[in-house]
Image (cartoon, rainbow, N blue to C red):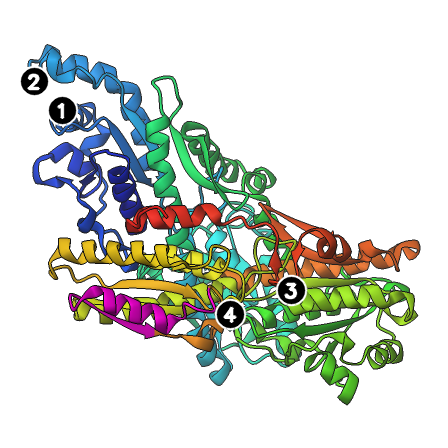
Amino acid sequence: MNGAVRAVVRTALTKGCDPYAIYEGYEGLVQGGHMMKKMGWADVRGWLSEGGTLIGTARCAAFRERWGRLQAAKNMIVNGIDALIVCGGDGSLTGADLFRAEWPDLLHELVDKGELSSSQISGYEHLTIVGLVGSIDNDMSSTDATIGAYSSLTRICQSVDFIDATALSHSRAFVVEVMGRHCGWLALMAGIATGADYIFIPEQPPNASSWGDHICSVVSAHRNKGKRKTIVIVAEGAIDSDLKPITAVDVKNLLVDRLGLDTRITTLGHVQRGGAAVAYDRIISSLQGFEAVEAVLDSTPETPSPMIGMTANAVSRKPLVESVALTKQVAVAIKNREFDKAMSLRDSEFKDYLDAFKTLSNIDSAEMKLASDKRLRIAIINIGAPAGGMNAAVRAAACYCLSRGHRPLAIHNGFTGLARHDSVKELDWLDVENWVIRGGSEIGTNRNLPDVDLGMVAYYFQKYAFDGLLIVGGFEAFLSLYQLEQARANYPALRIPMVCLPATISNNVPGTEYSVGSDTCLNALVEYCDVIKQSASATRRRVFVVEVQGGKSGYVATFAGLCVGASAVYTPEEGISLSKLAKDCEFLRQSYAQDEGQNRAGKLILRNEKASKVFTTEVIADIIREEAKGRFDARTANPGHVQQGGIPSPMDRLRATRLALKCMQFLETAQTHESGRGSSETAAVIGIIGAGVEFTSVKYLFDHEAELVHRRPRKTFWTTVRKVSDALSGRPDH
């Protein structure tokens, strides 16, 4: 929420508008006075790294009454406010649109009562409302993600990761209750991201008479395979098919009485709302806040109030009233036991993830097993630098194989390991059970391509009779797939379905807008830069030039700059010039002159490692020091391999899981079409394009979308992000 307020305030100022912060929600509108503060540029410095909401939030009974809204209208006009950007849930947004509908009548009443004159209301005949959705439940229809949801999910996953160690040590069961009265998003995503054994969500309640038997059978199956711990996640709104609540106590008693497990309950409560925002929430709050001001300026009296959301990986505007109405239909559908309808009102990813959880948890389901003649031998290999979520992808692929009756065969230490050491080992369920939360690569990885010894690679493909191949990795994985596809003409053993799952912090693989590991990298950078910025703020007059990884792709630097409020970002796509450095030095001089050393917010400049051969990180810091003339200082910082992350972020765990399962389904489908086994379409890259998942031939991507010299896609979708980042930092146009 603080990132959204910062973005609204600074965008409004750059557009020549007067921004006001209304403190304590609608209560501030009703009370007026000191609770309506005109904001300046410096008022929101440092807000990106602050948790909660610094302008406060509160439920307001008075605003629900007409007299309260009448007073709110008067206070707005007295302060010269004619537009309202509201960040909240469906209740707050509903109240805002009602306020807009009543606005003309409220003004007439204020004039009739003599509280305002006709001249005072002149120019304020219409109220503009724009909605931003701040909700940890991610329960708003018409948007893929709400502000705060991924930060909350991160808190949950961190807590469950800690609980996991205790559960493993004592061979205990833990029942974890998370928020979500009408929405099971947090419970579902946490269940996948932590490798939970079972979840309860309101959208798809279990059978009232048999849910106890089912959870016991699942938990028993996992324990019989050697699992020492049990994690069950319960949404606070969990119910059975008869709408009877299922509580954490109910689940605990069942596990104790039926299975004799030492079971404990953990209710996470409001810890789920706390802490600084993660990278993704900083990104969407900044982009949506910027767009909200644009929507205000585009609005006319006839324009329906818009809700700013995320659709297909981009900021979108949807009719606010329709979005709220769709959201409320979910609770109604659940109450009417129309559970299929409730599921349909969630986004398409929700069902995908629910199916994924069922696949990963019900490993011994006879219904999932294929006929023996349909079962495959599928190889899995990691190629390139480590990236957060690689292990989650391998785990998901292996679990899917085992649930279907396939045999997952891990190639350890890349193509070098295969060609020189015959390093193929079959994975079983217990091997990979806890990999979802581990960073790095459990099966090893390196940058060597198949041409390290293509003949030996093909020999081992034939020796182990691989029926399909999953390559998890970055640009080297992409090139590896292309080499294997091209070698099919000479090596029949390579004429099998093959798929590349992009996993790299650089997010530079053609055919996808998102690579597994990039979110973990951004979060590691955000934490690092928050600490560096704190150091800079303590000395008042210091700029840190931070060197960011990413190869020749500016993705990480661009988005990290938006997340940490960088004063400038240098990327390979744009390069660095003397004129650009001169303007940025002048910008820093002006900034320090204006705050006169009184502001505690430190300043950062992010430089991609390949942005320039001449203007290195050290050279830029030297130039800044020289140009500062002693008024401020500059230091360098290099997070290095910290950017590859430790524990993968929930987003990387989730997307790695979802994409890996779709890759396995691709290999199965391609395998069933014998005539196409050697065609280019059976060697593909999976990618997130907008809101969908697509497979694209590696040959097509190599020929048409890959910029091979710079090892990145020819098209970038984040160029507009830099413009927003510059606008919010105040950086002048170059």
Three-letter amino acid code at the position of disc 4: Ile
CB atoms of marks 3 and 2 within 8 Å: no
Please name which of the two marks, 4 or 2, marks the residue nearer to the observer: 2
Three-letter amino acid code at the position of disc 3: Leu
Residue 702: percent from left, percent from top: 72, 57
Determine the secondary structure under disc 1.
Answer: helix
For this view, does 371 lie left or right of residue 688?
right
The residue where tag 2 is placed is 115
Q: CA distance from mark 1 to mark 2?
A: 8 Å
Badge 1 density bin: few <14, some 14–19, many ≥20, Cα 10 Å: many
Q: CA distance from mark 4 to mark 1?
A: 53 Å
Determine the secondary structure under disc 3.
Answer: helix
CB atoms of marks 1 and 2 within 8 Å: yes
Q: CA distance from mark 4 to mark 2?
A: 60 Å
Q: Is residue 634 magenta?
A: yes
The residue where tag 3 is placed is 360
Q: Nearer the viewer, residue 415 or 631?
A: 631
Q: Earlier in the sequence, mark 3 or mark 2?
A: 2
CB atoms of marks 4 and 2 within 8 Å: no
Badge 4 density bin: few <14, some 14–19, many ≥20, Cα 10 Å: many
Residue 11: percent from left, percent from top: 30, 41
Which label belongs to residue 231? 4
- Going 57% across and 74% down the picture, which residue do you hit? 386
Three-letter amino acid code at the position of disc 1: Lys
Q: Which residues are magenta?
A: 612-636
Please name which of the two marks, 4 or 3, marks the residue nearer to the observer: 3
Three-letter amino acid code at the position of disc 2: Glu
Q: Nearer the viewer, residue 660 or 683?
A: 683
The residue where tag 1 is placed is 74
